[in-house]
Image (spheres, rainbow, N blue to C red):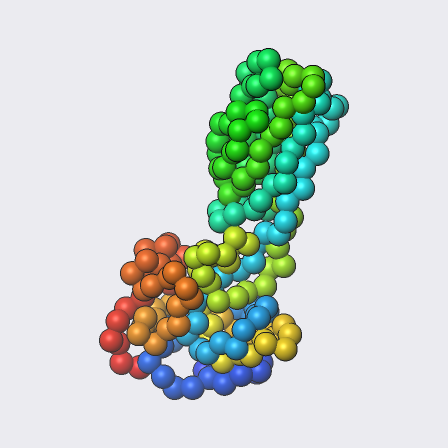
């Protein structure tokens, strides 16, 4: 449930008068969230776990070629849902394919028996004893994530590398998930925030602005 800012919260943690809010508190929008892990303080920049592991299977109707998909690794930028790999050019012991993401957008072109990376996925499509033909393919499913929040870090590959919210109160999830509160929009003093590894105020400022989160510096409470 999304609500406008309230001066106090009923969930676990503490809300202290500090310098985090840089604008009118009335315009700050909060939401109840579940923190997955970590002992974090008010002002921590959070990301959301939006995807999990990946699995693959031959397209509906099967393939002529009997090559196989290798392990699919989910990386930064992957989307939950079904990716479609389809052979577009056939060749002896080779071939070319395209990969579309769950929104139908082509995220890369690859070659059979050559490592592929694109759309947040990496894998190798192995050649088999029977060559692939045009139209053969695989569906790659990236599982949905838990939807829980963690401190955002650039090295994450589960979607939490994308900063989405700011923790509104101290919360300790070291012993298990906790329900707490996060800001979804508003104006905030970056000097009072905590950034995960790889993130800085400058590196996330523009992306957060697109979400309605505006960072300022040296702003009194």
Residue 144 image offset from top left, x and y in percent: 63, 51
Q: Is residue 193 visible from the viewing direction of this image? A: yes
Q: Quadrant of the C terminus?
A: bottom left
| Residue drawn at 37 percent across, 55 percent down | 207
Residue 150 image offset from top left, x and y in percent: 52, 66
Residue 70 image offset from top left, x and y in percent: 63, 36
| Residue drawn at 39 percent across, 68 percent down | 195
- Residue 53 is left or right of residue 183, and the answer is right
| Residue drawn at 60 percent across, 30 percent down | 125
- From what the image shows, is residue 139 above or below residue 209? above
Q: Residue furthest right?
A: 61
- Residue 199 is left or right of residue 137, and the answer is left
Residue 55 location, quadrant: top right
- Residue 108 is left or right of residue 83, and the answer is left
Q: Quadrant of the N terminus?
A: bottom right
Q: Is residue 105 visible from the viewing direction of this image? A: no
The residue lying toward the viewer, choosing from 124 and 7, is 124
**Image label count:** 0
Residue 198 location, quadrant: bottom left
| Residue drawn at 26 percent across, 71 percent down | 217
The residue lying toward the viewer, choosing from 72 and 98, is 72
- From what the image shows, is residue 81 above or below residue 188? above
Residue 160 image offset from top left, x and y in percent: 51, 58
The residue lying toward the viewer, choosing from 190 and 156, is 156
């Amino acid at each position: 449930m999304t609500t406008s800012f309230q001066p106090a919260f009923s969930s676990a943690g503490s809300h202290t008068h500090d310098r985090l809010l840089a604008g009118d508190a009335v315009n700050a929008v909060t939401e109840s969230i579940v923190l997955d892990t970590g002992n974090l303080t008010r002002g921590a920049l959070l990301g959301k776990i939006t995807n999990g592991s990946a699995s693959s299977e031959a397209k509906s109707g099967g393939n002529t070629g009997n090559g196989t998909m290798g392990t699919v690794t989910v990386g930064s930028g992957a989307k939950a849902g079904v990716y479609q790999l389809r052979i577009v050019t056939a060749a002896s012991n080779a071939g070319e394919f395209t990969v579309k993401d769950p929104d139908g957008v082509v995220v890369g072109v690859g070659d059979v028996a050559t490592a592929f990376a694109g759309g947040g996925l990496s894998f190798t499509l192995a050649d088999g004893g029977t060559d692939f033909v045009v139209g053969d393919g695989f569906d790659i499913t990236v599982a949905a994530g838990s939807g829980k929040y963690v401190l955002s870090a650039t090295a994450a590959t589960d979607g939490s590398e994308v900063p989405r919210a700011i923790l509104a109160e101290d919360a300790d999830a070291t012993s298990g998930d906790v329900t707490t509160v996060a800001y979804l929009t508003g104006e905030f003093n970056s000097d009072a925030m905590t950034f995960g590894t790889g993130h800085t105020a400058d590196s996330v400022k523009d992306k957060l602005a697109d979400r309605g989160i505006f960072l300022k510096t040296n702003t009194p409470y």
